[in-house]
Image (cartoon, rainbow, N blue to C red):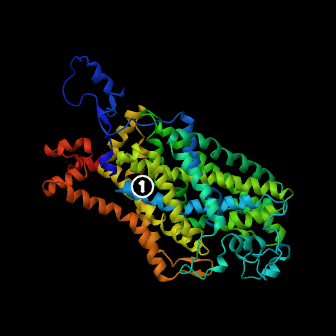
């Protein structure tokens, strides 16, 4: 799919005959030509109205595109995953990624719904996760002020202690996890989370229904607000006692960990999730740019902003963790954690001890909402744009199609807001976009750099921007990235361990279901290859040639002049 569509709308100016004087077009014919933009000897041809294809929408302003990309890249993982990884580690490809983005939407919207529930619960003078005595609390609920190293013992970390008011509010008050015995007993959706999920889906629909013209305006709020909130939390966190110890632990470098494969796997998975490489979101957003957009500058700018944001968020997180370790007289490693346990248990608990806790709680969960909404918008846009570009009937009915996608994700997300929904969410989070997204990016890297050709890819970029990517980038695209991705995919499969959630061990059948989810997207690549091979007419040689040749070069197959069958193609850089 990827190779077949490359250069579909880009054709050389003099592709056939020598230049001849242009004949004036009849008025009617001239009116049918929408746009022919010429730059650097390249013409971008858009379909006339008589055809099914419609003229492509573009961003209202350049800043809309940049904010959308930054908003998608800077998500919850920058807050709940990257800082902990730094501390812990010592400092039909197209259809496949669309399916992966759709899977992620099933459970990612649920996490946003949790944030919304916490936000509603924060509008009170006494935060509900501050003390015991609520209907959801167990008899074992313990005041966190009474917990210290001597009480916890040597084998229990504070971050894993399940009987604090904050932990019980999350697992018993929000998730109702105590009412489920496992993934085989998930129960019915909870009405509170159902309402929150409905609000999230409605916001997503009205942000996406008119395309980038509306979503480009929404990100002005969702992409910028988290930076203001993060700055406020960082400044306040640095003033707390014990903050310096937390930051010192965050910045500590253990060079010996670099020899461990898990460090590199964590790094690769984090960067793919954070930057969104392979999800199709960046391609979907970029497809609405003008042809001569400087994608090189945009890639460097957004990658830098994303990485700097992750690094700075670590200071905001670990200043609070240092404060908690100081208050409970435990080590940093006893409070350091990642994921939901960080943003829905530890951080809210720390906020509840601050002066003006209601204000800090509202501000924090507004930040989580903003981080989640624009990232979810990006994932949805990848699905909508990817399918609408291939099926014009969907593009002509974008509003209805957008409603179908958002409503479909809502229905399947209902499994994740049941009393045992956290087990379903954990399964999807582990399998839907783990090894499968790494595999999809590997296929993309091989497809573009080897079958299409890194030299031709570089020439395309030169036609867009006026200069060719340097040797470093071309070597990375052709050799370093595919080799590294292959290594990470293989190691992630070899090192797989049976799925768990805290002390709960998933049954074997649940692991097989998880691998089925992962393979459902991965097998689309060989399945599409087989479909194209079997549906193409001609000899074995011709079928293979058509399959690995871009559509605008299919006429060369008839001439038996296939670039991919020549040695110079595979050696070109």
Position of 555 compared to 405: left or right?
left
Instruction: Indicate the position of residue 148 as horizontal and vertical percent values.
Output: 82, 76
Q: Which residue is mark 1?
A: 480
> From the viewer's perspective, is residue 96 above or below residue 136?
above
**Residue 91 at least partly seen:** no
**Residue 561 at least partly seen:** yes
> From the viewer's perspective, is residue 347 above or below residue 233?
below
Residue at point 50%, 36% (across, down): 59
Residue at point 60%, 55% (across, down): 200
Residue at point 82%, 67% (across, down): 326
Q: Residues within 10 Å of mark 1 (few under 14, many from 20)?
A: few
Q: Quadrant of residue 21?
A: top left
Instruction: Indicate the position of residue 306 as horizontal and vertical percent values.
Output: 59, 49
Instruction: Indicate the position of residue 95 as horizontal and vertical percent values.
Output: 38, 56
- Asked whether 13 or 98 is in front, the reply is 98
Describe the element under mark 1 as helix, strand or loop: helix
Q: Quadrant of residue 529?
A: bottom left
């Amino acid at each position: 799919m990827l190779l077949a569509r490359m250069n579909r709308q880009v054709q050389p100016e003099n592709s056939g005959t020598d230049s001849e004087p242009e004949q004036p077009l009849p008025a009617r014919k001239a009116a049918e030509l929408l746009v022919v933009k010429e730059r650097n000897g390249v013409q971008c041809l858009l379909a006339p109205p008589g055809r099914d294809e419609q003229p492509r929408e573009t961003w209202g302003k350049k800043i809309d595109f940049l904010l959308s990309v930054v908003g998608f890249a800077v998500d919850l993982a920058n807050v709940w995953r990257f800082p902990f990884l730094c501390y812990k580690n010592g400092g039909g490809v197209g259809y496949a990624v669309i399916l992966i983005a759709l899977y992620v939407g099933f459970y990612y919207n649920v996490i946003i719904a949790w944030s919304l529930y916490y936000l509603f619960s924060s509008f009170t003078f006494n935060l509900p996760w501050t003390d015991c005595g609520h209907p959801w609390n167990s008899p074992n609920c313990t005041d966190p002020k009474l917990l210290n190293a001597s009480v916890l013992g040597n084998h229990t970390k504070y971050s894993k202690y399940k009987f604090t008011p904050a932990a019980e509010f999350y697992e018993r008050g929000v998730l109702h996890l105590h009412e489920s015995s496992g993934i085989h007993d998930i129960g019915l959706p909870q009405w509170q989370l159902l309402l929150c999920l409905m609000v999230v889906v409605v916001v997503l629909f009205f942000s996406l229904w008119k395309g980038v013209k509306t979503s480009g305006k929404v990100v002005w709020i969702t992409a910028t607000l988290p930076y203001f909130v993060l700055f406020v939390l960082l400044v306040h966190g640095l003033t707390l006692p014990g903050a310096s110890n937390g930051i010192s632990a965050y910045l500590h470098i253990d060079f010996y960990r670099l020899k461990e494969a898990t460090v590199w796997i964590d790094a690769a998975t984090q960067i793919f999730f954070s930057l969104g490489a392979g999800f199709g979101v960046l391609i979907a957003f970029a497809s609405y740019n003008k042809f001569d957009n400087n994608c090189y500058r945009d890639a460097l700018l957004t990658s830098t902003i994303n990485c700097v944001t992750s690094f700075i968020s670590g200071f905001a997180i670990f200043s609070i963790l240092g404060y908690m370790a100081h208050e409970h007289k435990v080590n940093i490693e006893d409070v350091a954690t990642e994921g939901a346990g960080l943003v829905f248990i530890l951080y809210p608990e720390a906020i509840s001890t601050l002066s003006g806790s209601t204000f800090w709680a509202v501000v924090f969960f507004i930040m989580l909402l903003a981080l989640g909404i624009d990232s979810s918008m990006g994932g949805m846009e990848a699905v909508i744009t990817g399918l609408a570009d291939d099926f014009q009937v969907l593009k002509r009915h974008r509003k209805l199609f957008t409603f179908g996608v958002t409503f479909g994700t809502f229905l399947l997300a209902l499994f994740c807001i049941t009393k045992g929904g956290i087990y379903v969410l954990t399964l999807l989070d582990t399998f839907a976009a783990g090894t499968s997204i790494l595999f999809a990016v590997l296929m993309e890297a091989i497809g573009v750099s080897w079958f299409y050709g890194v030299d031709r890819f570089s020439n395309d970029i030169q036609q867009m921007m006026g200069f060719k990517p340097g040797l470093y980038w071309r070597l990375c695209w052709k050799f370093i990235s595919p080799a590294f991705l292959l290594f990470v995919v293989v190691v992630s499969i070899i090192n797989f361990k049976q799925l768990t959630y805290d002390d709960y061990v998933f049954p074997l059948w649940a692991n097989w279901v998880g691998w089925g989810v992962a393979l459902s997207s991965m097998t689309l690549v060989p399945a599409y290859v087989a479909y194209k091979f079997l549906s193409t007419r001609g000899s074995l040689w011709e079928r293979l040639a058509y399959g690995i040749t871009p559509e605008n070069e299919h006429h060369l197959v008839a001439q038996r002049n296939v670039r991919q069958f020549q040695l110079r193609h595979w050696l070109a850089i």
